Each structure stands twice: as C-alpha cells, then as structure tokens.
Amino acid sequence: MNSAIAGFSKLSKEEKINWIANEYFANPSEALTTIKQYWNNDSKLQQLHDEFIENTITNFYLPMGIAPNFLINGIYYSVPMVIEESSVVAAAAKSAKFWSTRGGFKATVLNTEKIGQVHFLYKGDFQKLEQFFIQIKPKLFQETESITKNMQKRGGGILSLELRDKTSELDNYYQLHVTFETKDSMGANFINSCLEQLAKTIKEQAQNYPDFTEAEKGITIVMSILSNYVPNCIVRAEVSCAVEDLAEKNPKVSGENPQEFAEKFVQAVRIAEIEPYRAVTHNKGIMNGVDAVVLASGNDFRAVEAGVHAYASRNGQYSSLSHAKIENGIFSFWMEIPLALGTVGGLTSLHPLVKIALEILGKPSAQELMQVVAVTGLAQNFAALRSLTTTGIQEGHMKMHLNNILNQYQATSEERKAIAKYFENTAISHASVVELLENLRK
Ligand code: MEV
C-alpha cells in the first residue's frame, strides 16, 4: 500500500527522487539510475528545464524530426515536428514533396482576434447595467493602459469591450466579452492580466455608481479568463491541381487512375463531414501534424486542441475540419482552423530547441507560424486519406513501426537484416515479427 506525503514540493530534487524510488519500485536503485540517466550533464541547462514546472524529477524525451520540402506561398520550409508516433513525419514529408511539384500549398490568415471574458453576477435592472458600462468604458481602457501600452506599440491591445446578457441561460449571469489583438505573442498572460484589471475596475466602479441600488452595487466577479475558443483567429490552408496531375509514378498510391483516386478521396472527406465517428479520427490525423509543429515551436498544444475541436463542432455536430471537391477537372482540398499561436514570449525565448525550431522556420511571425502549422495538418490529412483510400494505412505504418518492435526485443543488427529481408514482400504484424525473432534465436 502506497502512502501519502506532506510537503513533497519542499523536498530537494534528490529527496523527491529517493522518495519516489523507494515508494514505487521493487528495485529503487534501478529506478534511480533510469530517472537520472535523462538528466542533462550541463547543470545550467538542467536547471532551466527543472524550472519550467514544479516537482521536476527528470526530463521526458520526445523525438524532434524534420519534414522538408514544404512549399508554402512560394517559399520552401523545413518543418520541425515533435511527436512520438512513427509514420507521422514520413507522411508529412511525402505529402510535402508530392505537392511541391503541383504548385505547393497556399495559406492565408483570415483573422487574428482573441477572446477573453469577465464572468460576473448582477442582481438588478439590465438597462441600468448597460448605462453603467457606457459610462465606465473610458475608465476600463484607462485603467488597463499600463498593461496594454507595450502591446499597443506593436499594433495590438484591446479591440472591443462588449456587455453580454446571459440571464436567459443562467440567473443573474453577465459577461464582459473582450476582443484582443496580441500580434506575435500567444497573449495568454497579457489577456488574463487585462481581464483581471477590468474585473477590478468593474467592481470598484459599481460600488461608487450613484444610480445603482445597494443590491446592484454588489456585482460578484465569478472569474476572469481568456477563452481558448478562437473562431475569429482562423488560418486557411489549401492545395489544388488538375485531377490528371494527381497521377503518381506508383499506381498503387494513386489508385487505378487519378480520376478514380480523386473521387474516392472526396468521398472519404464527405464521410468525415457527416459521420462524427469518422470525423474524430480524420481530425486526429490533422492534429498529428498540427500538434507536432505546435510543440516544436513551444506553443500550448492543449489550448490549440481544445479550440480546434470546439470549432469542428460549431454547427452542432462534430465534423471534418477539411473539405475537398472536384470541379471542372480541378481537385481542391482545404481546411480552415483556429490557431492562437505565438512566436515571442513564453517557451519561445526559453527552450533552446524551440529557438532552433523557430530559426529553422526562418524566425516566423505568429501569422506565418499559423500558416505552417495549418499546412502541416492538411498535409498529414492528405497523406492519411491517400493511404486509407488506396493501400490501407497499415502497410506504411507497420514498416515504420517495425523498428519499435525490434528495439523492444533488442534485436541485433544481424537479426534486423534478416527480418528486413523477410518482410520485403510480406505484411508486417507484431506477432509475425516476434515469431520470426524467436525462430532466429532458437
Ligand atoms: C493515425 O494517427 C491517424 C489516422 O488514423 C488518421 C485518419 O484515419 O485519417 C491515420
């Protein structure tokens, strides 16, 4: 039976690890060795990572790979991707190469607004509340000025303040719905600081507002927080080419003929548009690309995930983020997704590998990064649908996964060679690899 611990956060790193090792492992010294194996020899670098979060015991590695040859709006990018799933980087690279000879990807940022809300309770007359807001609006801008002035210099700040009556859905519930422009920063801290100041001003001003009754003066601030739903921070990524140009040297990957391939592809997208079970997996494939670049660029992938999936349900049913059509012999494939990203602030100036990733991307603005991320998602979706509607997903996937199985069983280089040869023309499965290894080892 494991025990609880008081004051874990106050222990030194060494004490924390010792406690974990003794509490949870039959062989504590083996666990200690593994945990410490992932420490960085450079103590300054280790300290930097230790201090990103609390109660750090070690570093958790994820591979960082590169998908080259992404032609986006006429510029070539090598895209850094951080992901644990085999096949994803290979699929992105394959899609990038395919479309680089067919005009490349086009990407457009449609808008960049971010949202935050002060949620509060008010018991009284709505018209009086409206009047109150009209009166205090200049004060709301004025009292946030010390927070917004630097952002304003960069062309951002608070774009609008809107009072929303939500009492038909929840008794006494109102919002101050605030729209922000945060330029190259993701802006979470900026937005939350502004909102907390706005809330403070509302509360103070209400207490001194002569037209309010005592009950009306007692506005209760429930919370002030940004929204990760950003339906007006949208980027569009697209590709198109003549249907006959979809032909590939290898007919296995483009179907019987390009027309047939294009039609089946469009059909696969239609299924994801109307069938939520398929839409979730379809969009998961898009997020394989999106998250990998979001992580590599030091952005908040949970925020992006939450916002993207809410957007995918905006019409009342979860649906495909991407769309495809064939019109006048032209195949088009596109998606629009919300992405609140930053290329300054947060991890972007702290994590050495994030700095490297952004440098590889040519030190992009937030808008450029939105374009690269969306394109990588679309490329991933194209690769997945191309495999699914032609060869099936497992052929390529298992080829990439073979290495993981061989590593799991610590295969020698001779065994690897023999196994690679055996599976040249045979379908790979976990069981068949293990069986072959066992036979080789007899
Ligand atoms: C696997 O990580 C992603 C796919 O399932 C996406 C899809 O089905 O479109 C291959």
Image (tube, rainbow, N blue to C red):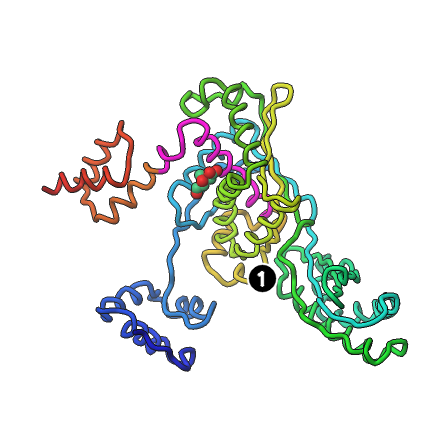
The magenta region covers: 369-397
In the image, farthest residue toward the right:
211
The location of residue 299, given as percent across then percent down, is: 54, 56
Q: Would you identify the image quadrant in which residue 27 lies?
A: bottom left
Q: In screen coordinates, is 408 left or right of 400?
A: left
| Label 1 Cα neighbours within 10 Å, binned few <14 / some 14-19 / many ≥20 | some
Q: Secondary structure at mark 1?
A: loop
Q: In screen coordinates, is 22 left or right of 78?
A: left
Quadrant, the C terminus = top left
Whether residue 402 is visible to the viewer of this picture, yes or no, is yes
Residue occupied by mark 1: 345
Quarter of the rendered structure image containing ligand 1: top left
**Residue visible at 43% across and 49% down in the picture:** 83
Q: In the image shown, does 396 or 38 lie closer to the viewer?
A: 396
The location of residue 60, given as percent across then percent down, is: 38, 60
Q: Amino acid at mark 1?
A: Gly
Rendered position, 277 above or below 339: above
Rendered position, 436 above or below 55: above
In the image, farthest residue toward the left:
442
The location of residue 107, given as percent across then percent down, is: 62, 39
Q: In the image shown, does 125 or 387 lie closer to the viewer?
A: 125
**Residue visible at 63% across and 61% down in the picture:** 187
Task: Check residue 46 for magenta coloring.
Answer: no
**Residue visible at 65% across and 46% down in the picture:** 314
Rendered position, 101 above or below 328: below
Quadrant, the N terminus = bottom left
**From the Cβ of disc 1, is ligand 1 less than 8 Å away?**
no
Q: Main secondary structure of the magenta part?
A: helix
